[in-house]
Each structure stands twice: as C-alpha cells, then as structure tokens.
Image (cartoon, grey):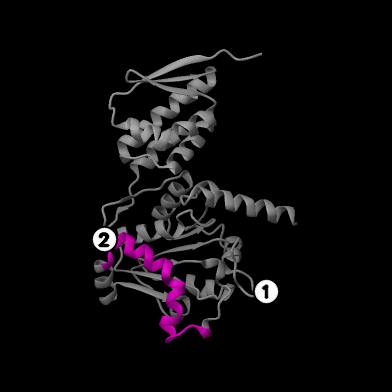
Amino acid sequence: MTKEKQEREIVIKDNRVIPELFGKLDENVNIIEEELDVEIVLREGKLIIIGDGLSAELGVRLINKLIEIIESEKKLTKQNLLYTVQLILEGKEENIQDLLNDTVCITASGKTIKPKTLGQKRYIDGIKQNDIVFGIGPAGTGKTYLAMAMAINAFKNKEVNRIILTRPAVEAGENLGFLPGDLQEKVDPYLRPIYDALFDILGFETYLKLMEKGLIEVAPLAYMRGRTLDSAYVILDEAQNTTNEQMKMFLTRLGFGSKAIITGDITQIDLPKGKSSGLVSASKILCNVEGIDFVYLTKYDIVRHPLVQKIIEAYEKYENEGR
C-alpha cells in the first residue's frame, strides 16, 4: 500500500540562503531528495517538501538545520550536508548547534576552525579537559590539524610557552639513508604535513618568527630523548609508527604545565615485522589512567573529499573478507 504524500512548507526569510541550500546545478537538493525520499520545490519564497509523513517531517527538520548552518558559516559544504543528513536520520540534530558554537581558533587567512563532527567535538573537549589525549582514527579525521589548532590557541593565550611537534621518522617504502642532505633535511619530508598545518594556521611569516625564537620546534622523535618538556604543548603525530620503547620515552618527557596530544591511525602501521606499535600498546596499558583520555574517531568523522570515506570502507571490507 502506497503511503499518502504530504506537503510541508518552510518560509525562506532571506533569499541569499537559496543558492547555498540548492547548490550548484541543484546538487544539494538532489542529495536531500535521494537520502530522505522527498521532493523539494521552491514556490513563491517558500520551500515545499513533499513526501510521506515521516519523510516530510525529516525534510523540514533537515532544511531548518541547513539554514542555520548557512546563516552561521555563510556556506554549505557537501561534507556538512551529508553529515547533517546523517544526524537527522539518527535523531541527533540538537548537537549541530554545539558544533557551530565551538570555535577553536582563527587562521592567518581569517578562516574559523571548528569541529565539524561530533567525534571531533569529543576530541576537542577531551583536549580541553585532560593533560594527555590520544586521538586515534583514520586519515582525514582532523586529528593532527585540530591538535595543532588547539596548541596554537593555548600558546596565543599564554597557557604554554612553546609548541613542540614531533613524528617518528619511519620509512614507509623509502630508505632514509638514500635521501639527500644532513639529518634534518633527511627527516623534513616526514615532518612536511606538520609544516603544512602550521603554515595554514599561523601564516608563513609568523611561523618563521616563532621558529627563529625557538618558540615552535619541529623535530623527529629521536630528538626528544633525555629532555624534560616544561610549559609546552607537545604533539606526537603518526604515533602508530612508534615502538613501545619510543612511546614510553615520549610520554615520560612531559614536565610541569605541559600537555601532550598523541595522534595516529592503527590501520596504517609501517613498523618492521615483529615490532609492536607503541600506540596500540599504550591504548591497552593506559586506558584506565586518570588524566589520560583516548578519543576514537571513525570514518564518519572524515572531513576530506567524500571519496576518502568510501575508500576506507572499501579497504575495511576487503581486509575483513580476507580474515
């Protein structure tokens, strides 16, 4: 038996939201119609949502939330649209306002950095409330970038005196010895993602000034041995490629007034066979230690190109079938 179609309407008070809401060549509206099984028509300054009772109701709730996002952000990205659809279908749309209101920092170009998913919001809250936080999840979930933004914000607010960013120089298909230059030049390619995030958030000139003063340090993990890191914001990136010994060494460097963020993806471990990942071990050893938080991000927190989520899903399916 076919469900009876209903019409619900939304009055559009500001016509400037229409282009963002509909998207290029009505791309956004097409996504909404397909996901919610509704039809959307613009008629005399009103949006008409046509569908069965539940679908029409979900459509109204979704459109109203999307309008809130457009009014706040001045734009509607495909990622924001798809994630909002997901929250509406799960009945979690009340959390959207929390995402819109939580600003981490402003970049040199004036871009506002905010958590874009509930997982990222949980990550940011964990960093605010704990001195050591592990951010574990797949590529594209914003683990390193958000940690960097939080570090820069803390530095600007004089909560710490310096920022230290480090990575293990693990070879993933390349041999470090064959790269040209001295040791710093050899490890720079491994640290490039950290540099890129710094340039984006701080701007190149500010970054250079802080580097010259020693207020920002970017170094391979081996440089951390024997040091005590006081009043510092320390970020260990690609932590899945640390050994147990390296992870313990890093965590015990933390001094007074410092905070450490450890990020990694346990599905992309490049260590030699027979070597255990320090990140995997730490998640078991330290999971019940007070003051340490573990935040697990998922494919639903990916904020890169929509294909990244599909790629991760395809690999997960392939690996599960191979077991």
Q: Which mark, residue 213?
A: none
Label annotation for residue 273: 1
- Between disc 2 and disc 1, whose residue precedes? 2
Q: Quadrant where the N terminus lies?
A: top right
Q: Nearer the viewer, mark 2 or mark 1?
A: 1
Q: What count of labels does the image hold?
A: 2
User: Are there few (<14), some (14-19), or many (20+) residues within 10 Å of tag 1?
Assistant: few
Question: Magenta includes 305?
Answer: no
- Give the residues drawn in magenta, as a range: 177-204
Q: Amino acid at mark 1?
A: Lys
For the point 63% across and 51% down, which residue is it? Answer: 314
**Relative to residue 120, is residue 150 depicted above or below?**
below
Give x and y (percent) for residue 101.
33, 41
Q: Residue furthest front?
A: 25
Q: Tell me: 143 left or right of 198.
A: right
Residue 197 in the magenta stretch? The answer is yes
Residue drawn at the location 43% of the way across and 47% of the way down? 121
Q: Secondary structure at mark 1?
A: loop
Query: Is residue 161 among the parts visible in the rendering?
Result: yes
- Residue at the disc numbered 2: 156
Q: Amino acid at mark 2?
A: Lys
Q: Is residue 298 visible?
A: no
Q: Does residue 211 appear to the left or right of 248 in the view shown?
A: left
Q: Quadrant of the C terminus?
A: bottom right
Residue 321: x %, y % from top left: 73, 53
Q: Main secondary structure of the magenta part?
A: helix
Q: x and y percent of residue 210 in the render?
A: 26, 71
